[in-house]
Amino acid sequence: MARTRNAAAPTVSSRVLPVPPSGQPTRRRNPDAARAVLTAAIELLDNHRVGYRGLTMQSVAERAGVSKATLYRWWPDKAHLVLDAYRSKTARDITGTVTGDVAADLKAHLGHLAFALHHDSARTVSEITQAAAVDPEFGRLYRETLLAERRQAILDILLAGRKQGTVRADADLTVVVDMAFGALHHRLLLTKAPIDGPFVVALTDLIVASTRAQVPARS
């Protein structure tokens, strides 16, 4: 029998969470139940007394008011569930506006990431990133889903700039994306220096300067 969700439990947001597509197409998810599960997983991830290490499939099932069998029918393990939950929470991270103005688009996109990390996701992101570094299977899933989607968002901005002629054709955009995420993760995981507005502006200026196409001199 399904358990009743604790009415006193805090909710992560009033917005409707997007449900990432299932990797198992023959196992259709009930959207409402899936959102309840994803919300429960996010609440536990963001709870400093639980976090990634303390989260279990049993604790998610109890908080969401569904059976553990239901969870395993839709997600094969904790790794898949955690990544889907965090992808649902941070869906805006991969939907940045791409106008072709690299500086403006990067400032807007990196500014959104900085705001999220500064306000409510720093500890969760740190735990997930560290888990991906030490757990081979979780690391593979992390790279193929969460990280790949976020890297593509920045790459799309740079590719649009290249199409507009403002980004050099010979610039190694993969390395540029590495530079952006390397700077973010270095502060998040190691130096603990602020990931704020001035940092976003400085990082954007560095990326733009290193990729700027040369304007032909007028005769």
Image: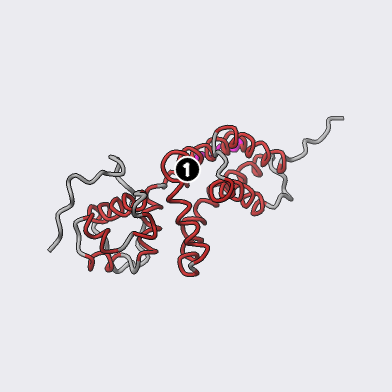
Image quadrant in which the N terminus is located: bottom left
Residue 92 vs 84, above or below: the answer is: above
Q: Position of residue 154 (x, y in %)?
A: 56, 46
Which residue appears at 66% of the width and 51% of the height?
173
- Over which residues does the magenta segment extend? 95-101
Query: Dot 1, how many residues are within 10 Å of its Cα: few (below 14), some (14-19), or many (20+)?
Result: many
Residue 194 vs 185, above or below: the answer is: above
* Residue 148 is inside the magenta segment: no
Image quadrant in which the C terminus is located: top right
The residue carrying mark 1 is 117
Residue 174 vs 114, above or below: the answer is: below
Q: Position of residue 19 (x, y in %)?
A: 33, 53
* Residue 98 is inside the magenta segment: yes
- Residue found farthest to the right: 219
Which residue appears at 51% of the width and 61% of the height?
143
Q: Give the tally of numbered discs.
A: 1
Q: Is residue 147 left or right of residue 71?
A: right
For the rendered model, the colour scheme is secondary structure
Which residue appears at 60% of the width and 43% of the height?
160
Main SS of the magenta segment?
loop
**For the residue labelled by badge 1, is the local secondary structure a helix, a strand or a loop?**
helix
Q: Is residue 10 left or right of residue 106?
A: left
Quarter-of-image position of residue 26: bottom left
Q: Position of residue 48 (x, y in %)?
A: 37, 49
Q: Is residue 31 left or right of residue 132?
A: left
Q: Is residue 176 left or right of residue 121?
A: right
Quarter-of-image position of residue 77: bottom left
Depth order, front residue of 168/131: 131
Residue 19 vs 207, above or below: the answer is: below
**Label 1 amino acid?**
Leu
